[in-house]
Image (spheres, grey):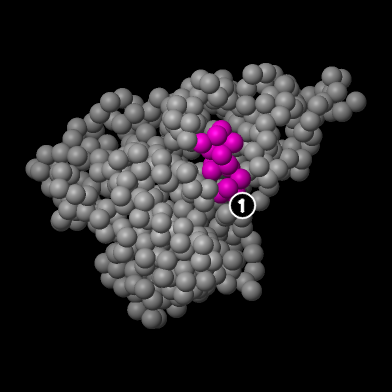
Amino acid sequence: MHHYDLIIRNGTVLTFEPEPLFSKSDIGILEGKIAFLGSLPPESQSRETEIDASGLVVSPGFIDFHSHVDCNFLTARQLVLQGATTTIGGKRNFDGKLINKISEEGFLLNHGFFLSQSFTLRHAIGLSNPYAPATNREIQKMIRLAELFFESGSFGLHFGLEMVPGVSRKELLELSSLAKSYHKTVLIHLRKDGIEVIDALKEALEIARTSGASIHILHLMYMAGTLDLMRQCLSLLSEAISGGLNITADTGLYEAFPTYIGSSILDPGWEKHYGQTITYRDVLISSGFYNGNFCSPSSFHFLRKEFPNTLVTVFAFDEKAAEIALARPWVYVSTNAGDGPVYEGIGHPETAGTFPKLTRKYVRQKKLLSLGEAIYKITLGPASRFGISNKGNLKPGNDADLVIFDVQNLRDTSRFSNMGRPDGPPEGIKNVLVNGKIVVRDGKLTGQVHAGKLLSALQSPR
């Protein structure tokens, strides 16, 4: 008789072999791993529980590789309720104490980290002015620090050029070349969005050609979110990929992007980046006392001066641009979760609703993607791209990170703060398992808040 810690029976299981394949299968889980996938004998027993997944899809746990969770439980809760089992953060901060805490105690979901040049490395060497380029000596200091981070398991190197515009080409090139030597992907938030995005993308492509590094372009929708700009960017990226460059990208699914009101993104003249019709009144205040109200010129300048960390949402783009991006197999989907202060009832709906929206709108309603294609963009695609081991696919030996959902009733309920709750939980997620532990049952947390593990990507330089 076969014994497992947990058994899932009668589910429609999604695997990638390498194409998406749905099959009626059972899953046996033992010691946090998938031990069996197929038709279990009826006499097989579970030591803990059995889940009847009849009529439900069982897929790999979703991987949110572009988020700002950074150990924040409220953000992690919103992610796991929408099916995420793994997050990769570190793009804005790298707190060693919190990382050690995850290593020792676990976390709600699996958590790894990228290394941010624009924030972590610059701040570590005392370069806090976002508009100042690093000197040669400072670049060398950053290189030595980056080597330590890479050798300690960072998944890649991040540049937040739009928020830290002082980063020079020399910084970009030398650190990207270092990332190449450690087989690390370089993630780039382009230097400019809106009408200046094409030149910004060309800068990133030039770095890819010169350094030879693999490059990932972050959130296309928030950088080039009009039909014309998106088509131009995708054309440039396709040409570069056809020419042999190792490039991928990701996109969000919303027409409005989040940022701090004090960010350099909203420096004087910001509105000219998005065409003639964008004004202060397209900026939605998304945290603080005025949460849910659009800005006036006076409130915009007041908050920018007195409360620069106020989260705002800028309605600058056309959601139809996301449809064009999603059609490319090398464009994945990310949430950008937790970009800003995190409290109950504030923020951007992306943190709670991105993955359910992907299936509801782009699979079921618009039929732009098959369900397998959509799930690939949030599972095996990013897992393979960023070297996230033993995740992204359901097969024996892999970690038992999985989502059980009702595809016909899966939908997002999160809304922009002027229309509802940004943190509204999705409907249709039945169970979420992290390392074989049930962290979500019937759409609610179970109390298994330490099921996740600290992830690392240890590799040696060539």
Residue, disc 1: 384
Q: Principal SS element in the magenta part? A: helix
The kind of residue on which mark 1 rests is: Ser
Residue at the far right in the pictured view: 1
Q: Position of residue 130 (x, y in %)?
A: 29, 64
Instruction: Give the structural element (helix, strand or loop) at label 1.
Output: helix
The image quarter in which residue 134 lies = bottom left
**Left or right: where 174 falls relative to 85:** left
Q: Quadrant of the C terminus?
A: bottom right
Depth check, front residue: 213 or 50: 213
Total labels: the figure holds: 1
**Left or right: where 74 falls relative to 271:** right
Residue located at (41% from left, 70% from top)? 206
381 in the magenta segment: yes
Q: Position of residue 121 (x, y in %)?
A: 42, 66
Q: Position of residue 160 (x, y in %)?
A: 37, 59
Q: Position of residue 43 (x, y in %)?
A: 87, 20
> Does residue 118 show up?
no
> Does residue 379 show up?
yes
| As drawn, 363 above or below 41 | below
Magenta residues span 369-383
Residue located at (46% from left, 75% from top)? 210
| As drawn, 216 above or below 38 | below
Residue located at (31% from left, 31% from top)? 416
Depth check, front residue: 341 or 335: 335
**Few, some or many C-alpha atoms within 10 Å of disc 1 (few <14, some 14-19, many ≥20)?**
some
Depth check, front residue: 85 or 242: 242
The image quarter in which residue 46 lies = top right
292 in the magenta segment: no
Residue located at (50% from left, 55% from top)? 248
**Left or right: where 449 falls relative to 295:** right
Depth check, front residue: 215 or 30: 215
